[in-house]
Image: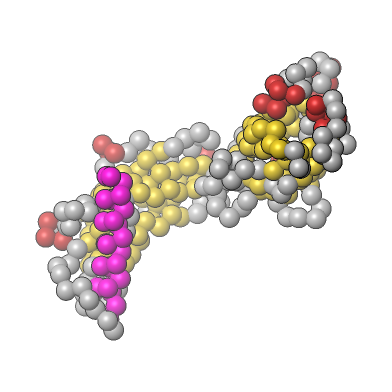
Amino acid sequence: MKKLFIGCITVITVLMGLAGCNSERTTYEGPNYLMFSDTLYRYAVQETGEVFNVPVSATVLADYDRTFAVEVVDSISDAVEGKHYRLLSNTVTIKAGECSANVQVQGVYDNIDIDDYLTVGLRLVIPKEEQWSLYGIDSKVILQKACPFDINSFTGYCKVTSTFFDDYMQNVTMRLIKTSVNPEKENSVILHDLYYNGHDIVLDFDRDNLLEPLVSMEEQVCGTTAEAFGTIYGDGNLLMYQPTMYTSYYSTCEKFVLQYVTLYVNGVGTVGTYVNILEWISDAEAEKLKEQGY
């Protein structure tokens, strides 16, 4: 219920801000409030040093510049200013005739670990009469590291572990496979012999959102029923697809994929849903595994 209430407040605030800033059709006639446009943001800190904009809004226009301070709130922060990030200015100015401006934050890529989830708490320093009591004057920015993406990082030798092995390949604890760039599609690789020799799987990497590094795949044949079950069922093909009810993702920093897959036989039924973990390793690591019989 609390989340729903906060969400409704955010929507109302945005609508009020839009109404107050529309010089042709103004429907908001209340007092002037200043606020962050939202209470929470996630920022992908990249090696290239992109600056993250935290929007600040006003509910009404003004015919003069409005400059006010922004401070870091230590009680709601665990990121260290100067180490993990820089606040590029301690003030923000909404110019005359405008109703929004940005507080600029720049993460320090080298000082953020791959598993960090750091919070910067920001607060507007504004007069009491310009604060909307229901919404507040604070916002949080979450800093997460986003390593550079290179499809070639997901090629070469790869360790595969899967819960499928436990059910149908009980003498297998791990497979060492090779992967290569898919020449027919961008940001895509071919997993050679994923479960069974002679059966390759195409895996796609989604690059639309740095903070949601997802993988996907189309339905494909991953083996035969004879290999999996010792006999022929249906047309003899064991099919694999990625179910939408679970999140399958990759890590550019750690070079791994966690993927949920559902296996089934056409005309017969579902075998089950399993988890694949793919970890890319160096040639030297692969040679050691080969010496161990993988």
Picture residue at 51% right of the left edge, 51% below the top: 49
Q: Residue at x 11, y 60 (%)?
A: 129
Q: Is residue 14 above or below residue 185?
A: below
Secondary structure character of the magenta stretch overall: helix
Viewer-closest of 234 and 278: 234
Residue 249 quadrant = top right
| Left or right: residue 50 compared with residue 76 | right
Q: Position of residue 61 (x, y in %)?
A: 23, 74
Magenta region: which residues? 1-23
Q: Residue furthest left?
A: 129
Q: Percent position (x, y) of residue 9?
A: 26, 56
The answer to whether one can see residue 136 in this image is yes
Q: Quadrant of the N terminus?
A: top left
Residue at image coords 84%, 25%? 230
170 above or below 8? above
**In the image, residue 11 lies in the stretch drawn in magenta:** yes
Of the pair 230 and 44, the residue shown nearer to us: 230
Where is residue 272 shown, x and y percent of the image? 66, 32
Task: Determine the image quadrant of residue 177.
Answer: top right
* Residue situated in front as seen by the camera: 105 or 219: 219
Camera sees residue 255: no
Lateral position of residue 252 relative to residue 170, left or right: left
